[in-house]
């Protein structure tokens, strides 16, 4: 049964109209040097920031993965943002096996 909650409580709990979404990404890399890795990460970070998004994750010479959210407190990335990340990663010569998850509620665990 759905609970009736006040707007203030929905906002505190990030539910209803205040749900915040994000998505995960991962890919396999074929990098030969730290310089190549740094260049990829810097380029990807600039791409993410241009879309007003934030990125958290990790990278090594064989894999790159993380989570993307919107920069605003109650904002969420759009389906266009998700598709753009998938496209950007897929276009990189050193990236393969790109996987981008569906948008999911970042405050609710499964």
Image (tube, grey):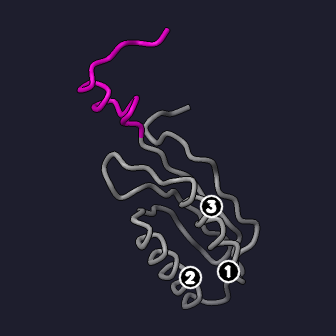
Magenta region includes residue 3:
yes
Question: Quick one: label 3 or label 2, which is nearer the N terminus?
Answer: 2
Distance of label 3 from label 1 (alpha carbons): 15 Å
CB under 8 Å between callouts 2 and 1? yes
Residue that sits furthest to the top in the current view? 1
Magenta segment: 1-19
Distance of label 3 from label 2 (alpha carbons): 19 Å
**Label 3 secondary element:** helix
Snapshot quadrant of residue 30? bottom right
Question: Quick one: label 3 or label 1, which is nearer the N terminus?
Answer: 3
* Badge count: 3
Residue 10, percent across and down? 32, 27
Q: Residue at x 61, y 90 (%)?
A: 33
Front label number (3 vs 1): 3
Q: Residue at x 59, y 88 (%)?
A: 36
Apparent side of residue 3 relative to residue 78 in the rendered image (left or right): left
79 relative to 93, above or below = above
Q: Which residue is mark 3?
A: 83
Residue 8, percent across and down? 23, 26
Q: Which residue is mark 1?
A: 92
Q: Which residue is mark 2?
A: 40
Q: Residue at x 53, y 87 (%)?
A: 39
Residue 44, percent across and down? 52, 76
Front label number (3 vs 2): 3
């Amino acid at each position: 049964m759905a609970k009736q909650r006040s707007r203030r409580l929905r906002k505190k709990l990030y539910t209803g109209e205040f749900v915040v979404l994000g998505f995960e990404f991962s890919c396999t890399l074929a990098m030969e040097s730290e310089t190549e890795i740094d260049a990829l990460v810097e380029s990807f970070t600039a791409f993410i920031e241009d879309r007003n998004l934030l990125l958290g994750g990790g990278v090594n010479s064989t894999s790159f993965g993380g989570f993307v959210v919107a920069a605003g407190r109650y904002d969420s990335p759009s389906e266009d943002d998700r598709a753009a990340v998938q496209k950007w990663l897929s276009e990189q010569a050193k990236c393969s096996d790109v996987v981008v998850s569906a948008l999911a509620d970042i405050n609710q665990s499964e």
